[in-house]
Image (tube, rainbow, N blue to C red):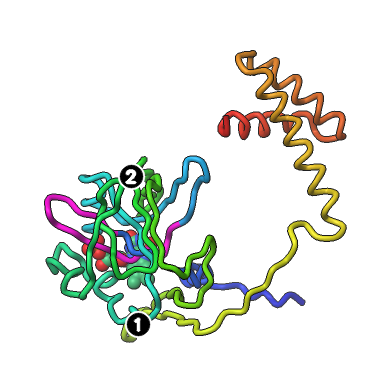
């Protein structure tokens, strides 16, 4: 018998947590606002794109739309008591909420975007596009500069930075509560990339990718049809489905 039990779709959003929420900060005409956002993700390496799902009603949404620059900031869990200013009330109804909350605002060095000086890390973004997806819009931005405290040494050491994690909120008619998790301790585990039996399969994959890339680059300026034909030859050699060539071509085209 499976351990999995059917979950009511009304509650299924909470399955997606815990996440580390980010604070989106924007400014237009001297007015700054910031909001918590749990629904964010990296979308691309090159260009370095991050997407945040933001409801059009948020005051921060309007500021991003007008100024086209903003930042995303990550705070330590010790700042938990300030989160209601960021996530429960709107700048539209409570002017200067960021300052009232006791946050300090600085500027990014590239875009002069407002950043939270009290954060553990901040990234400055330029609006790339807004995609209407549902009741929220996907705000896609390109990262133009990044800042972090010493704890970030090419990777988080998580000694001075204990990220705040969010588990969701309870529902009416009971008193609504936001549930956060504060982690005091972390256990680090390193596992080898494609260990043991997987090593050979992984290395064949990268060998094929290298070969395809070499062909793609060598055939710059040739027609798509001709390039596809050559790439398909490589896939056949490795007993792979030659019709998958189109996917590889697409990846190479975007990386070029
Ligand atoms: C932990 C947490 C996560 C949230 N995630 C999102 C989100 O991803 N997208 C969104 O539009 N609102 C999200 N919200 C709600 C906004 O932060 C909230 O509506 C905020 O008050 C908007 O402020 P503003 O109107 O000044 O921009 C979240 C709130 C909390 C507390």
Q: Is residue 107 visible?
A: yes
Q: Is residue 79 magenta?
A: no
Which contiguous range is marked in magenta?
25-40
Residue under pointer 1: 177
Judge from the rendering whether residue 123 lies leftward or rightward of residue 67; answer left or right: right
Label 2 crowd bin: few (<14), some (14–19), many (20+), radius 10 Å: many
Tell me the quarter of the image containing the C terminus: top right
Tell me the quarter of the image containing the N terminus: bottom right
Residue at horizontal 76 percent and vertical 31 percent from the top: 211
Q: Main secondary structure of the magenta part?
A: strand
Residue at horizontal 21 percent and vertical 61 percent from the top: 33
Judge from the rendering whether residue 220 lies leftward or rightward of residue 135; answer left or right: right
Q: At numbered mark 1, what does the secondary structure look like: helix, strand or loop? A: loop
Query: Is 42 drawn above or below residue 246 in the view shown?
Result: below
Residue under pointer 2: 126
- In this rendering, the label closer to the viewer, 2 or 1: 2
Label 1 crowd bin: few (<14), some (14–19), many (20+), radius 10 Å: few
* Residue 28 image point, x, y percent: 17, 50
* Residue 174 image point, x, y percent: 34, 86
> Which corner quadrant of the image does residue 226 belong to?
top right
Q: Is mark 2 within 8 Å of ligand 1?
A: no
* Residue 56 image point, x, y percent: 27, 53
Residue at horizontal 87 percent and vertical 34 percent from the top: 239
> Which corner quadrant of the image does residue 126 belong to?
top left
Q: At numbered mark 2, what does the secondary structure look like: helix, strand or loop? A: strand
| Quadrant hosting ligand 1 | bottom left
Query: Is 74 drawn above or below residue 57 in the view shown?
Result: below
- Number of disc labels: 2
């Amino acid at each position: 018998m499976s351990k999995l039990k059917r979950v009511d779709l009304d509650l299924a959003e909470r399955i997606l947590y815990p996440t580390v929420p980010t604070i989106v900060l924007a400014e237009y005409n001297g007015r700054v606002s910031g909001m918590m956002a749990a629904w964010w993700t990296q979308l691309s390496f090159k260009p370095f794109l991050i997407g945040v799902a933001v409801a059009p009603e948020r005051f921060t949404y309007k500021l991003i739309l007008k100024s086209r620059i903003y930042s995303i900031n990550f705070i330590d869990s010790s700042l938990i008591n300030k989160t209601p200013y960021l996530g429960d009330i709107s700048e539209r109804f409570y002017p200067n909420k960021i300052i009232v909350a006791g946050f300090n605002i600085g500027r990014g060095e590239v875009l002069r975007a407002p950043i939270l000086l009290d954060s553990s890390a901040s990234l400055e973004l330029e609006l790339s596009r807004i995609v209407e997806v549902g009741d929220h819009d996907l705000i896609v931005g390109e990262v133009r500069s990044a800042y972090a405290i010493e704890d970030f040494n090419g990777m988080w050491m998580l000694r001075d930075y204990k990220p705040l994690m969010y588990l969701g909120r309870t529902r009416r008619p009971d008193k609504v509560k936001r549930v956060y998790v504060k982690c005091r301790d972390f256990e680090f585990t390193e596992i080898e990339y494609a260990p043991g039996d997987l090593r050979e399969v992984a290395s064949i994959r990268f060998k094929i990718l290298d070969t395809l890339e070499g062909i793609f680059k060598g055939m710059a300026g040739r027609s798509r049809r001709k390039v596809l034909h050559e790439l398909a030859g490589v896939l056949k050699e490795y007993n792979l489905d030659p019709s998958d060539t189109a996917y590889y071509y697409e990846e190479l085209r975007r990386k070029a």
